Amino acid sequence: MHDPNCIFCKIIQGTIPSKKLYEDDDVLGVFDINPASPVHFLLLPKRHIPTLQHVKEGDSSLLGKMLVLIPQLAEQQGCGDGFKTVINTGPNGGQEVYHLHIHVLGGPRPWKRATI
Ligand code: AMP
Ligand code: ZN
């Protein structure tokens, strides 16, 4: 369920502090510690899944739930005018934290960084 060396698992377990915007039994939403845009949060499954390449058929409902949540959370964060979603996957995908997460970026442009 949790990887003791994973920073996001530590956030989920509460051993590392975070600024949470959403939580249920399966999913956690936290603001990115180094935001690339005025609104930048991450949605992560509570179960440790390293990358999008590790998802299985049985994860369909979890992933679907995350996608359905995103526009609701984005709206709550003032991103009714739109937002960007990003999933970095593996070394060539630029992934830094190996616990699956969906970036949600929004707010008035220009943004601090064009890419994440
Ligand atoms: P990625 O390159 O997709 O793996 O992105 C990892 C993201 O996690 C980066 O945008 C980091 O700023 C963010 N991050 C790293 N540590 C933390 C933390 N403790 N709390 C919130 N966000 C974090
Ligand atoms: Zn993890």
Image: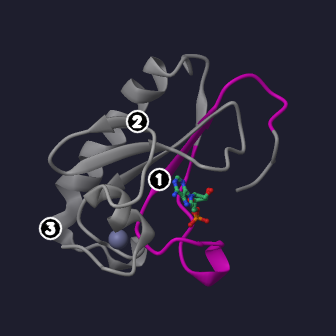
Disc 1 crowd rating (10 Å Cα; few below 14, some 14-19, many 20+) is many
**Image disc number at residue 58:** 3
- Which element is circle 2 on? helix
Upstream in sequence: badge 1 or badge 3: 3
* Disc 2 residue lies near ligand 1 with CB under 8 A: no
In the rendered view, tell whether residue 57 sits above or below residue 4.
above
- Which element is circle 1 on? strand
- Kind of residue indicated by mark 2: Ile
Disc 2 crowd rating (10 Å Cα; few below 14, some 14-19, many 20+) is many
Quadrant of image for the C terminus: bottom right
Q: Which residue is drawn at the image coordinates 40% and 28% (left, top)? A: 73
Q: Nearer the viewer, residue 14 or 98?
A: 14
Inspect the magenta stretch and tell me whether residue 96 lies in it: yes
- Kind of residue indicated by mark 3: Gly
- Distance in Å between CA atoms under marks 3 and 2: 20 Å
Tell me where the magenta segment starts and ends, as one range: 85-111
Q: Nearer the viewer, residue 32 or 57?
A: 32
In the rendered view, tell whether residue 23 sits above or below residue 75.
below
Which residue is under mark 1? 102
Q: Nearer the viewer, residue 73 or 81?
A: 73
Q: Which residue is drawn at the image coordinates 69% and 30% (left, top)? A: 38
